[in-house]
């Protein structure tokens, strides 16, 4: 339906209807919101989504488990390893596979690196929306280093598909580990640099403090998750409350703020970047030796050299490549803490090598109604700030 | 609370509303009929020991390919932030006139996923304020995530290799 057909251009009330998006640079993708304005103040905000609908859930019902992993990268395209991990954990729970310690540590390193990269994109674009151009360029500079590390280990800069069912795609290489160590040695002073530009900047404070505030009860009731929930005073991080992939072995803190406004969400994410860096440091230090994928021939491919000598390995290899992994009948859901909040795949298996149903719990999707609730009563200039502070990714909203 | 304790507690509080329980890999799962869903949800949210104040997700499943009496299912994933435990509520829904009451009056976060349930499966949500398409276009026909909705290619407006492509689609065996 066009804008004229919907009557959006008519003015028969005291309020004005204003269309924002889907092609608006500050809506972080193809998000459209229809604002009912009274002067400069937003009366109601009605979200409109579906412009990036790709039918990944339907496609997944026609692909083997292994083939779904590259598609999960495309859901939340700023935090691909988190999505890979969520899908693999659910599948592994149905399969009942034990993951080796080294694979778990590599998964944690990858996820925390991508959390840093995702928060850098958020900080850069969010600051740019509010008018701070320099931070944007600085953030991109550091993000580029994470992307180079991604390329080093997986060959791809963004859609890594590095985490696989049963472990990871390949073992860590020395240049990669060295690169990560260099990056985390270099990174902390850069976070201080962003903070020097923003945290006490009077313009930044004017634009963020007290804007788009949600109380603790509201944030829980509207199903916000991740940094947006923690900014409202809820101390809930799935890495602590339901640890997965060995997060219980690392010592880190959960940043929590109490006002629930844009500034507090900013503070939480900045501190999360520091904590992620500390987790990577610990994981590198105590990186266990051993297998990088489960030595279970029903799940992961046997080592290349055994194919020439072992008949069984050859058969398993052939079966895995031609038929894929058959997952026992059942349904399960394993939540993880992604960069934006609770991510998890609800998988229903009918006992074949193709999932019967795959449903992503997307933090951005769940946050959109609450985000539009926050917009009510604030100025139109703050709408952009609120969208940025929730950090939506339309890839996982529309799926 | 562990899964077993949650199930025991729920059974003690709502003996007649719970149809069945399950404990797959330690997760607490309860089966509920659509007409008692709202009462169960209210109990789960307000009970002091359970206090499921956070709704993680609502999803639909179509069990057309399995031999089942009830074709659809809507699944509610609940979490308690204070007690750090979770439960899954599975609601079987019949094929003719599928409908289920809303829980969006208890958890506002249910508004969007319930609307998606209608959009993708055609399950009517009783009492939901906006029962219309969410992700698909407003004039779309059919419900894409149903199992009998075919997975086809989209007709393109123009293409240099359209004939070749349609041949390819016809000759391709199913992905399985």
Image (spheres, rainbow, N blue to C red):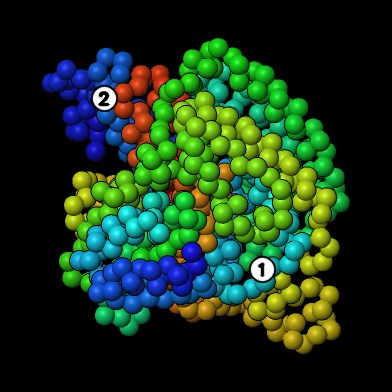
Give x and y (percent) for residue A124.
59, 27
Circle 1 sits on which residue? A166
Give x and y (percent) for residue B62.
33, 69
Residue A97: tell me if it is visible: yes
Give x and y (percent) for residue B171.
45, 71
CB contact under 8 Å: marks 1 and 2: no
Direction left: furthest residue? A12
Q: Is residue A240 above or below residue A297?
A: above
Q: Residue at x 72, y 51 (%)?
A: A250
State which mark lies toward you, 1 or 2.
2
Q: Residue at x 51, y 39 (%)?
A: A230
> Chain under label 1?
A
Q: CA distance from mark 1 to mark 2?
A: 50 Å
Q: Residues within 10 Å of mark 2 (few under 14, many from 20)?
A: some
Residue B163: tell me if it is visible: no
Give the camera-side residue of B94 and A192: A192
Left or right side of A173 for A209: left
Name which quarter of the figure residue B22 lies in.
Answer: bottom left
Q: Is residue A225 above or below residue A331?
A: above
Quadrant into which the N terminus of chain A falls: top left
Give the camera-side residue of B81 and A290: B81
Q: Residue at x 48, y 60 (%)?
A: B85
> Chain under label 2?
A
Name which quarter of the figure residue B51 lies in.
Answer: bottom left
Chain-order first, disc 1 or disc 2: 2
Give the camera-side residue of A342 and B63: A342
Q: Residue at x 66, y 68 (%)?
A: A166
Badge number at residue B2: none
């Amino acid at each position: 339906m066009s804008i004229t057909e919907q009557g959006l251009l008519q003015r028969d009330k005291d309020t004005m209807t204003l269309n924002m998006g889907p092609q608006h640079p500050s809506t972080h993708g193809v998000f459209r919101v229809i604002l009912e304005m009274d002067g400069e103040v937003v009366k109601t905000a009605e979200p409109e989504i579906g412009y990036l609908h790709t039918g990944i859930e339907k496609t997944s019902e026609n692909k083997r488990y292994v083939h779904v992993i590259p598609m999960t990268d495309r859901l939340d395209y700023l935090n691909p390893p988190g999505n890979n991990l969520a899908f693999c954990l659910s599948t592994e729970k149905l399969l009942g596979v034990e993951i080796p310690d080294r694979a778990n540590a590599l998964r944690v390193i990858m996820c925390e690196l991508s959390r840093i990269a995702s928060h850098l994109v958020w900080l850069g674009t969010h600051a740019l929306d509010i008018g701070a151009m320099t931070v944007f360029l600085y953030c991109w500079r550091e993000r580029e280093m994470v992307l180079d590390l991604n390329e080093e280990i997986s060959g791809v800069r963004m859609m890594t598909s590095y985490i696989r069912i049963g472990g990871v795609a390949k073992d860590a290489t020395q240049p990669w580990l060295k690169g990560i160590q260099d990056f985390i040695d270099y990174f902390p002073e850069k976070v201080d640099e962003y903070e020097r530009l923003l945290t006490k900047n009077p313009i930044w404070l004017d634009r963020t403090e007290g804007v788009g505030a949600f109380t603790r009860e509201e944030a829980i009731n509207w199903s916000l998750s991740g940094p947006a929930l923690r900014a409202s005073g809820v101390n809930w991080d799935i890495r602590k409350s339901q640890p997965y992939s060995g997060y219980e072995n690392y010592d880190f803190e959960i940043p929590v703020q109490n006002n629930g406004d844009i500034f507090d969400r900013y503070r939480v994410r900045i501190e999360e970047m520091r904590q992620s860096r500390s987790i990577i440091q610990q994981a590198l230090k105590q990186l266990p030796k051993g297998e990088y994928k489960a030595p279970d021939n029903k799940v992961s491919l046997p080592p290349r050299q055994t194919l020439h000598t072992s008949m069984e390995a050859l058969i398993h290899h052939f079966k895995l490549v031609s038929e894929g992994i058959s997952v026992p009948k059942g349904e399960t859901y394993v939540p993880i803490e992604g960069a934006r909040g609770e991510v998890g795949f609800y998988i229903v298996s009918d006992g074949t090598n193709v999932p019967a149903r795959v449903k992503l719990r997307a933090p951005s999707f769940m946050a959109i109604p609450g985000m539009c609730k926050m917009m009510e009563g604030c100025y139109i200039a703050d709408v952009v700030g609120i969208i940025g502070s929730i950090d939506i990714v339309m890839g996982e909203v529309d799926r | 609370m562990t899964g077993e304790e949650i199930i025991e507690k729920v059974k003690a509080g709502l003996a007649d509303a719970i149809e069945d329980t399950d404990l797959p890999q330690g997760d607490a799962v309860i089966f509920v009929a659509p007409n008692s869903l709202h009462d169960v949800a209210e109990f789960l949210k307000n009970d002091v020991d359970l206090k499921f104040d956070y709704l993680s997700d609502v999803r639909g499943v179509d069990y057309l390919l399995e031999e089942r009496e009830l074709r659809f299912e809507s699944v509610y994933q609940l979490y308690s932030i204070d007690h750090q435990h979770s439960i899954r509520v599975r609601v079987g829904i019949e094929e003719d006139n599928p409908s289920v009451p809303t829980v969006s009056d208890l958890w506002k976060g249910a508004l969007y996923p319930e609307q998606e349930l209608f959009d993708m499966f055609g399950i009517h949500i009783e009492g939901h304020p906006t029962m219309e398409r969410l992700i698909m276009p407003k004039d779309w026909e059919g419900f894409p995530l149903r199992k009998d909705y075919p997975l086809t290619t989209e007709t393109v407006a123009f293409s240099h290799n359209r004939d070749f492509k349609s041949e390819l689609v016809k000759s391709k065996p199913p992905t399985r």
